[in-house]
Image (spheres, rainbow, N blue to C red):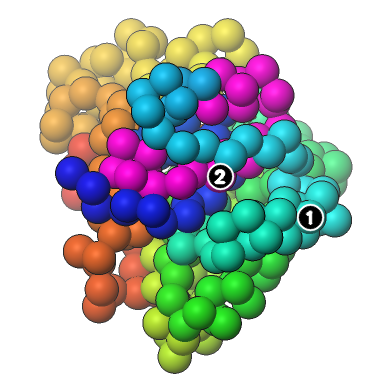
Amino acid sequence: MGLLVDRVCVVTGAGQGLGRAIALEMAREGAIVALLERNPATLEAVAAEIGGEGGTAAAYALDVTDYDAYGRVVADLHARFGRIDALVNNAAINPPTRTILNDTLEDWRRTTAINLEAVYMGSKLVAPLMVARRSGRIIHIASIQGFASSGEIGPYNAAKGGMIALTKSMAVELGPYDILVNSVAPGFMLTPMSIVNGVDETKTPDFIEWYVRRGKIPLRRTGYPEDVSGTVIFLASDYCRYMTGQLLVVDGGLMSTF
Ligand SMILES: NC(=O)c1ccc[n+]([C@@H]2O[C@H](COP(=O)([O-])OP(=O)(O)OC[C@H]3O[C@@H](n4cnc5c(N)ncnc54)[C@H](O)[C@@H]3O)[C@@H](O)[C@H]2O)c1
């Protein structure tokens, strides 16, 4: 459709799952997509996939918590393309640690470093380029667990809640520069992250019974990465012009039930 023709769009964690789907879809819409991913094998695979479809990708093997290296990537993108039009903060981990009674401080620090601090730092590195051009989009991939909880994964939830709050403060601060900051909260998505301790949580009998058969998810299925990528395209495109500081929930209706 060409909604992002020649826009330079950065996607973190682009090697698999939602990040891969977002990157592929952005490229199909005409964007030059910068893939930031710490796994070189999946990074190269997605870059090849985009190239194979006739799209343009710039691949960077990067751990987003390495801020010196992240700064060099941003500088390189600026040198090559002269701008960054959109940043999608997608990279995250969801370690199978669990409760506040069992987690360690190290678990907390590792999770919040990637899922929140690196979002703050990545945005901090990219925003000045957008400010200079008075134009840009920053999109955080949060989670419904940022405002609702199954009673587990406290550090993950806290990081996602922090992202939602950060969305608002960044939107207010960057609004005068025409930089729109929004976030997306996916529900249960079928990605490698949904496989916890070797079990795909979206395929267990309990999940099928409660979320699908009994309709706790009104759309009666788990979500696919492609269900989220369209929402991100919208937020990065000119169809989204007067919306900032918002959270779009993409969960098949899960949060509308009780
Ligand atoms: N899968 C779900 O059910 C679900 C639900 C809600 C929100 N989300 C969010 O969606 C986003 C994508 O999740 P996913 O399911 O695709 O996850 P995933 O685990 O399948 O993919 C995450 C990608 O990020 C990369 N990554 C992780 N840490 C990194 C780092 N430090 N530096 C660079 N790359 C790094 C991984 O290598 C991987 O390629 C995450 O922010 C996640 O929290 C996922």
Q: Where is residue 221 in the image (x, y as percent from the top left)?
A: 21, 23
Whether the magenta-drawn stretch holds residue 152 is answered as: no
Q: Position of residue 19 (x, y in %)?
A: 48, 36
Q: Where is residue 252 in the image (x, y as percent from the top left)?
A: 21, 38
Badge 1: how crowded within 10 Å, few (<14), some, or many (20+)? Answer: few
Q: Is mark 2 on a helix, strand or loop?
A: strand
| Distance in Å between CA atoms under marks 2 and 1 | 13 Å
Q: Nearer the viewer, residue 233 or 142?
A: 233
Q: Name the residue under label 1.
A: 72
Under mark 1, the amino acid is Arg
Q: In this view, does 55 lie to the left or right of 157?
A: left
Badge 2: how crowded within 10 Å, few (<14), some, or many (20+)? Answer: many
Q: Which mark is residue 34?
A: 2
Residue at x 25% of width, y 73% of height:
241
Q: Nearer the viewer, residue 157 or 57?
A: 57
Start-end of magenta stretch: 26-47
